[in-house]
Amino acid sequence: MSSFLQSIDQFGIEEKVLFQRSITSKKSVFGGIMTLFIYGVTLAYFLYQFIDWIDNNKLPKVTSTSKQINHSETVGAKGKFLEISYFSQSDKQIDPFNPTSLIYYPKLTLNPSQTEIYDIQFEQEISEDGKTINKFVLYDIELMGSPPQYLKLNQKDYQISFKRCNPEILKEGMQCANEATFNQYKEQLSLFQIQIYIEQFNIKTKQLDKIPKFYILNMLTNKIIFYTFQLECSLISIDDGYLFPNSIFQKFFHNMYQLIQEYDEDYAKKYFDKDLVMVVFLTLDQIKKESLYEYPKISEILAETGSIISWVFTISYLVTWYNQELSMQNINSEVILMYFNDFKNLTISKNWYGKITNLSFKEKSCEKLKMIKLLNKLQELAKQKLDFKTILLELSRIERVLVLLLGQEKIKQLLNRPQKLETIIDKYSIIEHKDASDISNQIYPQGELSNVNLKPAEILDNEGLLNIELSLEQELEQQLCFFSSIDTLNNQIQDKTQFVNIKDNFKLKKIDSNIFQKGNSPLYQQAP
């Protein structure tokens, strides 16, 4: 079972040899400047996109389709919906809606029930030039419609009929015009201006804005004109959630179409009221529009920003390449120093884009072309030394040299005799403490008693522990880090400018220089 679980583990890690260089990173001033630039541009662009999204400046995705209305489709409009007034072209013209000399008066009915309602109101408005505009206004309507294929049609339409003024139905404060005024009015052009308010969705404020549409109606004598306005409704779904969908539905009138029908005097007298002169008919259109407004969510803003940022971060590959080249130069220099320890005395001067301008060795000028050729060759050889196959090849040669020098049996004996930690623990961790009183109880000659340095037991213990720790570290380094301890000694020699004979300290055997191809390494040279 455990083998099966291990085989399906998706979180396994690759075991790697931990070289010291693998846990460090090469950094440069150029990389730091580019880091500030890239992250600064990234943050600025994200803040710009985020603020623009908060202010609703991001356009939503809109999907629209047209459908037939449902059975008993009901659409309403709140507030002012319609207003009609006389279209005056001269101050001398008679206004038929003048409340003190009223010629025509509107009558509002609901069809098909023919129910008369009194929701139409008379209002006066002062224009910018100080002229009084008399008008009739309709508020808060509700239309209903059904497709014609249904047997039972649920219908609700509005009809505004304009008739000759009747004093019996006038409101208080109004008065009908006399016959002379009416005859004078018939001599002038009878034009009316109707204004119907439709609504449009504002994508920025997410509210409905009223938009007026103007039409000119002509009232003719001896004829009845039917002006039919078919109002098209719109059903919208607004998804403005920040992270998850949040749908809000709204229904309103968003468009209308005008149809005109004219009837002559004989037909009008036969089928309509004799005082009827004009009819405005409001009905619901059979086609409706459905739209979905989907605003960008925070995830889309992050995705859009991330795509731009990923493009900006392509510059980081240039910086990575620069740091990689800089790191390779340092590695090559370290490899060259392993074989030529005076390579550090070579001074190389470069310009801002890396071209060598001057070379000197121990403050002596060198011929640039020849030294560049030498450096290129050294770097080429250093790269070959860092090749994994080259390392394996040299290890195999060292193994062969050891077999030739020691023999397989001797090597097997050394390998089969592993180092044990028990001897080190017994030697350094198990300590027999001696009481300081033992020293004071010893008998010394009279002349030697003054030369005895009596120390407290605590000081003796601390000095003993310190000596034990130093000896333990030295023995562990000799057994585990033999060659690194040699490097440490060499560094100490250079710091103290003293010469230490490595051969005498560590008793290295002399190996024939012809066996090692790199016999000039400072690690294997004998002291004179």
Image (cartoon, rainbow, N blue to C red):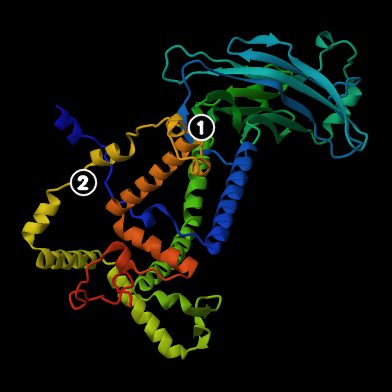
- Which quadrant of the figure contains the C terminus? bottom left
Which quadrant of the figure has residue 268? top right
Q: Which residue is mark 1?
A: 291
Residue tagged by mark 2? 419
Give the tally of numbered discs: 2
Neighbours of disc 1 within 10 Å: few (<14), some (14-19), many (20+): some
* Left or right of 307 on screen, residue 163: right
Residue 448 seen from this side? yes
The N terminus sits in image quarter: top left
Is 27 situated above or below 448? below
Depth order, front residue of 251/495: 495
Q: Is residue 327 visible?
A: no
In this view, the residue in front, 469 or 346, is: 469
Type of amino acid under label 1: Ser
Vertical order, 76 against 169 (above or below):
below
The numbered disc on residue 33 is none
**x and y, in percent, of residue 442 in the image:** 42, 34
Please, what is the three-letter code of the amino acid marked with disc 2?
Gln
For residue 471, side relative to residue 40 (left or right):
left
Q: Quadrant of residue 321?
A: bottom left
Q: Position of residue 303 (x, y in %)?
A: 48, 43
Q: CA distance from mark 2 to mark 1?
A: 82 Å
